[in-house]
Amino acid sequence: MPIIEHEIHINAPIHICFDLARNVDVHTETTAKTKEKAVAGVTTGLMENGDTVTWEAVHLGIKQKLTAKIIAMDRPYHFTDVMVKGASHSFTHTHEFIERDAGTVMKDTFSYKSPFGFLGKMADRLFLERYMRNFIADRAKELKKIAERNQGHIKTS
C-alpha cells in the first residue's frame, strides 16, 4: 500500500489553512486540472466531521466518481477523510496543520490501495503513485497561493 507524504509551509494562520483545506469550493478551484466538481453530499462550503462528498473528475483521462467521508476532525489541527466508494480499493487522507515560523505547515499523508491485485501494484510502480504524489503536491501549491494571497479577506467559517 503506497503512502504519500507531502509538506508545505504557508504564510497564513493555521485556522485559515485548515478551513481552506476542507472547503469544497476551494477544493474545486485547486483541482481545476482534473475538472473536479462536487455532485452529491456537501457540494459547497465547509465540510464537517461525518460529512460526505461525491466528486466527479477526470483522472488519467478517465471520467470517474468517488465518494469521501470525513471520519475525524480536530479544528484547526487535523482532519481525515476516507474513500467510501470509488475506483480505488481504498484510501485514507490525513490533513495536518502545525503552527510554525509565523505561518502554518500543512502536511498531507495519503495512503491508498489500488484495485486489481498484482496489476494494481504494477500500475502503482509504473505511474499511479507518481501521479497521486504530483496531484497532492499541485493541490497544496494552489491552496498555498490562495491562502497567502487572500489570508485577510477570506470568510472561512
Image (cartoon, rainbow, N blue to C red):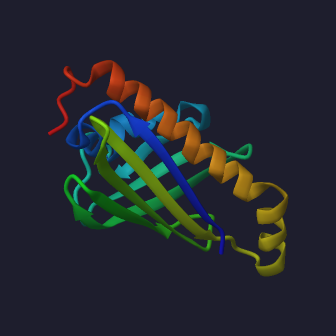
Seen at 47% across and 42% down, the residue is: 8
Q: Looking at the image, which is closer to me, 86 or 24?
A: 24
Residue 3 drawn at (x, y percent): 60, 67
Q: Is residue 74 visible?
A: yes
Q: Is residue 29 visible?
A: no
Q: Quick check: 54 above or below 118?
A: above
Q: Quick check: 78 above or below 104?
A: below
Tell me the quarter of the image containing the C terminus.
top left
Residue 31 drawn at (x, y percent): 52, 36
Seen at 61% across and 52% down, the residue is: 64
Q: Looking at the image, which is closer to me, 3 or 90?
A: 3
Report which quarter residue 90 is drawn in. Answer: bottom right
Residue 36 drawn at (x, y percent): 51, 40
Answer left or right for 74 relative to 108. left
Answer left or right for 35 relative to 80. right
Residue 30 drawn at (x, y percent): 47, 34
Answer left or right for 126 relative to 64. right
Seen at 27% across and 35% down, the residue is: 102
Count of marks, rendered view: 0
Seen at 56% across and 35% down, the residue is: 35
Report which quarter residue 10 is drawn in. Answer: top left
In the rendered image, the residue lying farthest to the left is 157
Q: Quick check: 66 above or below 17?
A: below
In the rendered image, the residue lying farthest to the front is 101
Answer left or right for 78 relative to 136. left
Tell me the quarter of the image containing the N terminus.
bottom right
Q: Looking at the image, which is closer to me, 53 or 102?
A: 102
Q: Looking at the image, which is closer to me, 141 or 135?
A: 141
